[in-house]
Structure formats: C-alpha cells, structure tokens
Image (spheres, helix red, strand yellow):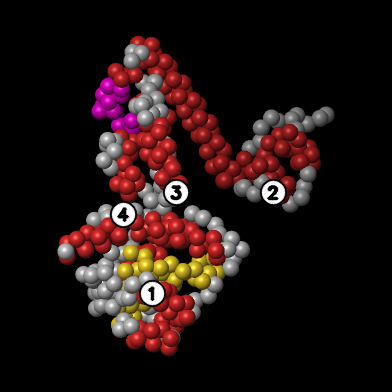
C-alpha cells in the first residue's frame, strides 16, 4: 500500500529537509522520506541555511510584503482614477493647482503627491514655457561646462545679473534643467586661538603666499604645481607645473615675476626644504623680501594659497584627466587668466582680483 502524499510541510520538517540538503543529500530522497513531490522540495531550496524559527519569520515577512504590494497597487489605481476624474471635471490645470494647495493645507502630503492626485504635471517634468528660456538654459549649461566647479550663486552674478532675468526664475530653470551641483558637505571644527593670524595687507605686493600642490597624471605619475598668490587681492601671480619640486624652480618663478615688475615685500610659505635652500635665501636677501614661515602642522597660517589650492582642485583637477605635464600647464594658464580677470571672490565683495586692485588704485589716487 503506497504512502499518501501530503501537499504541505511543517516548518520543522522543512528545516530538517534543508539541513539534509545542506549536508549533501538529494531532493528526490527527501521527497520520498516525507511523502512530497520533488517540486515541493525545490520551492524550499532558497531557504537553505535557515532553522525552524527563521523560516517562520521569513515566511511571515513574505506574507506581509504581499499584502503591502496589493495595498500599494490598489492605492495607485485609486490615485489614477481620481486624477482622471479631476481632469474631466476641471480641464484647466491652473485651477486644479488651487485645489492642490487646498489639499496640502488639510492633509500632510507633499506637493508632488497632491499634483499627482489632481492630474497635474510633477515638478520634475515641467518644461520651460516662457519664450527664451531654452536659450537661457543653453547659456547656463555652456557656462557650467566651461566652469564646472562653480554653482548657481556665482554663475548668476557673472552671467545673468542685470540681464532682465530674475534670480527666482533663473534658479527655477537651473533646477528644472538638472544643472544642480552636489558638493560634499564639509563639517569643520573652528581652530583654536592662533598667535600668528593672517591679516589682509593694505597694498599690492606687500605679502605673497607660495606653496606646492601635488597631483597625478592619468598614468599615475606625480607632478607638483607651484602657486604664488598676492594676499592683498588674491591674485594668482604664477602657476608652474613641475616634474619635481626644487628650490631652483621657486627662484626661477620669483625672478620671472621680478622681471615683469612684481617684487614682494614679504613671502609667506611653509617649512618645506624648497623654501629653505641657499639659493632661495640669497634671492630674498638680494631683493629685500622678508621671509615668513608657517608653524609646522598649521596650514591655516598660509591660508590664502591653500584656498587657491582648493579652488584649483575643484575647477581643474577634479574635472579633467591629464596625460602630460604640458596639458596641465596649458589648462592652468587658461584657468589662471579667468581666475584673475573674471572670477568673483566673496572676500573681495564679489569682484575679481584685477577689478579689486584697480578699485584700490583709484581709491588711493
């Protein structure tokens, strides 16, 4: 007499079968032992490794998930039906928007959900409606392609202020075109009392800050960038890309600036060996430049050039990949011209370094 086959297994039986399968047993033998079909054993195979208690928990979660999916499908169907009825009763979308405001005032839902219920276009798919908006978006996109490290506030001041476009409308188009930049939020702790705080000097070429920035080419080779910044107006005096940092390179750039008519009264740097070489000390003594060194481990003492390094990384090194030092030098020369001539600085009242220097010169005159 053959054994009657049961259609369901208890969780204890299923746990024992899974244990047998985990130890190398076959599904056919387990099916014969417990009087079920091999297909039933196959349905339990995804749960190998679970005991009876965890099988009970997982099955309960699966039943809950099915219930939630059915409820979600029903809710979506109800919203779709409501939106269809609202569109038939009130074809004008502007009037339906008034109902959306009323719904949000009475129920704790977001604008996107209220618009969906009333059959309105969601904010993510709104198309520009004013004449000229497409050209404005194209202009903003072209500017951000050329200046990838800048966001909306600086772009609006440079490109759109005084053009007849309001800030609200420009920002709305900026967001709709998905031009928003997502910068990492940096939470920094304020430094403690500093004995040698950096103060902005009152004349050009009073104090220069110089330092090296290190980065790598696409093939992994490292290179050094020597930057010199006038602390008075944040002007980038020179930017030189080098295969290696050396005192001779520092002196060469300082001498080139001197031949162009720029000699600093004071040079601020860190304690690197490149800024303590005999050739560097002789050049400073020969041309009357006082030397100031930052405290070891305190880059805030040389904050002006460090700020330029941050901007340079955001607008050049984080946006392009370079294969040679010549490519880096060409891009940095182009960047330095824009940085000095047109890029506004918040510390300078949203003026470029050249504009700030010209205004200071007129003020003295």
Disc 4 to disc 1, C-alpha distance: 28 Å
Q: In the rendered view, does 52 fall on the left or right side of 179?
A: right
Residue 185: x and y in percent read 37, 55
Q: In the rendered view, does 16 fall on the left or right side of 212?
A: right
Disc nearer the start of the sequence (2/1): 2
Q: Nearer the viewer, residue 333 or 38?
A: 333
- Which type of secondary structure does the marked residue at label 2 adopt? helix
Disc 4 to disc 2, C-alpha distance: 70 Å
Q: Label for residue 344?
A: 4
On screen, residue 75 above or below 44? above
Residue 156: x and y in percent read 32, 44
User: Which region is colored magenta?
Assistant: 97-113
Disc 2 to disc 3, C-alpha distance: 62 Å
Q: Residue at x 30, y 57 (%)?
A: 352
Q: Which residue is mark 2?
A: 19
Q: Are marks 2 and 1 in contact (CB under 8 Å)?
A: no
Q: What is the crowding at mark 1: few (fewer than 14 residues within 10 Å), some, or many (at least 20)?
A: few
Disc nearer the start of the sequence (3/4): 3
Q: Nearer the viewer, residue 150 or 57?
A: 150
Disc nearer the start of the sequence (1/3): 3
Q: Which residue is mark 1?
A: 259
Magenta highlight on residue 10: no
Disc nearer the start of the sequence (4/2): 2
């Amino acid at each position: 007499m053959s054994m009657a086959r049961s259609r369901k297994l208890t969780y204890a039986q299923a746990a024992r079968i899974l244990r047998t399968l985990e130890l190398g047993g076959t599904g056919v033998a387990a099916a014969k032992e417990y009087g079920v079909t091999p297909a039933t054993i196959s349905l339990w195979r995804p749960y190998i490794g679970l005991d009876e208690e965890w099988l009970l928990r997982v099955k309960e979660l699966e039943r809950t998930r099915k219930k939630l999916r059915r409820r979600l499908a029903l809710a979506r169907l109800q919203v779709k039906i409501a939106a269809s009825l609202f569109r038939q009763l009130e074809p004008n979308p502007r009037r339906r928007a008034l109902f959306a405001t009323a719904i949000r005032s009475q129920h704790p839902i977001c604008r996107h959900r209220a618009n969906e219920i009333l059959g309105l276009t969601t904010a993510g798919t709104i198309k520009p409606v004013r004449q000229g908006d497409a050209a404005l978006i194209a202009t903003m996109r072209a500017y951000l392609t050329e200046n990838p490290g800048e966001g909306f506030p600086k772009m609006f001041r440079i490109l759109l202020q005084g053009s007849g476009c309001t800030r609200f409308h420009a920002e709305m188009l900026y967001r709709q075109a998905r031009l928003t930049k997502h910068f990492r939020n940096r939470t920094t702790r304020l430094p403690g009392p500093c004995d040698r705080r950096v103060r902005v000097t009152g004349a050009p070429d009073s104090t220069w800050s110089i330092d090296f920035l290190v980065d790598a080419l696409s093939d992994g080779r490292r290179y050094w960038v020597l930057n010199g910044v006038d602390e008075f107006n944040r002007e980038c005096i020179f930017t030189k890309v080098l295969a290696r940092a050396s005192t001779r390179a520092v002196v060469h750039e300082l001498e080139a600036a001197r031949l162009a008519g720029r000699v600093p009264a004071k040079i601020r740097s860190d304690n690197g060996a490149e800024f303590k070489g005999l050739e560097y000390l002789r050049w400073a003594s020969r041309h009357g430049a006082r030397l100031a060194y930052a405290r070891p481990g305190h880059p805030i003492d040389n904050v002006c050039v460090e700020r330029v390094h941050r901007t340079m990384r955001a607008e050049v090194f984080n946006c392009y990949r370079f294969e040679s030092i010549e490519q880096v030098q060409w891009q940095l020369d182009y960047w330095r011209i824009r940085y000095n001539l047109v890029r506004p600085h918040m510390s300078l009242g949203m003026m470029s370094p050249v504009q700030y220097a010209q205004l200071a010169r007129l003020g003295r005159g």
